[in-house]
Amino acid sequence: MPIYAALRYRDAPAAIDFLTGAFDFAEKERIDNEDGTIAHAELAYGDGVVMLGSGDNAGDDAPDVRAARFSLYLPVDDPDAHCERARAAGATITREPDDMDYGSREYGARDPEGYHWSFGTYRPSSE
């Protein structure tokens, strides 16, 4: 059974633009509120989905809290090219692409609101 991440962003419309532009997500569903905030959105990445909306449920220190306590990992075929795309779109690269001892090539990035994302060639076992 899949697990779906649900994230809250202070500026969800900007987050959707960033995630689709920098990290190659595809916008699948978007429900806008009348005030320009996002009631609910779903962004697809391969077979996975990240749900997000407007709001701040982490407090004033959210970027630090998000960076320290929350990270998402997504598989990519070419971490180096993916990293350059993310960098060009304004992502803060927190870890340059590197070869891991367990055979994966990975990098880390932080989005504009402080969530930490890792991308690499590692694919968890389905068994």
Image: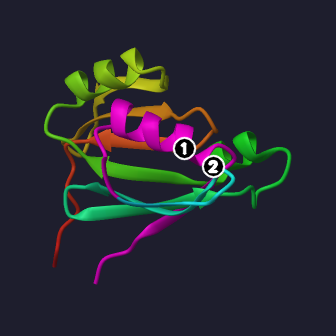
For residue 36, the mark is 2
For residue 115, the mark is none
Which residue corresponds to the image point at 69% horizontal and 47% vertical from the top-left? 10
Is 69 drawn above or below residue 4 in the view shown?
above
Quadrant showing the C terminus: bottom left
Mark 1 residue element: helix
Which residue corresponds to the image point at 19% horizontal and 43% vertical from the top-left? 121
Q: Residues within 10 Å of mark 2 (few under 14, many from 20)?
A: few
Q: What is the distance, in whole Å, between disc 1 and disc 2 at their CAs?
A: 8 Å
Q: Is residue 53 left or right of residue 31?
A: right
Is 54 drawn above or below residue 91 in the view shown?
below
Mark 2 residue element: loop
Amino acid type assigned to the residue bearing label 1 in the image? Pro
In the image shown, does 113 or 75 lie closer to the viewer?
113
In the image shown, does 104 or 92 lie closer to the viewer?
92
| Residue 74 image position (x, y, % from top left) | 31, 50
Is 104 drawn above or below residue 88 in the view shown?
below
Is 4 drawn above or below residue 41 in the view shown?
below
Which residue corresponds to the image point at 23% horizontal and 62% vertical from the top-left? 124
| Residue 25 image position (x, y, % from top left) | 31, 46
Q: Quadrant of residue 29?
A: bottom left
Instruction: Inspect the magenta stretch and tell me whether residue 11 lies in it.
Output: yes
Q: Over which residues does the magenta segment extend?
A: 1-28
Which residue corresponds to the image point at 20% horizontal and 42% vertical from the top-left? 76
Q: Is residue 120 left or right of residue 9?
A: left
Circles 1 and 2 in contact, beta carbons < 8 Å: yes
Amino acid type assigned to the residue bearing label 2 in the image? Gly
In the image shown, does 25 or 110 lie closer to the viewer?
25
For residue 13, the mark is 1
Residue found farthest to the front: 34
Quadrant showing the N terminus: bottom left
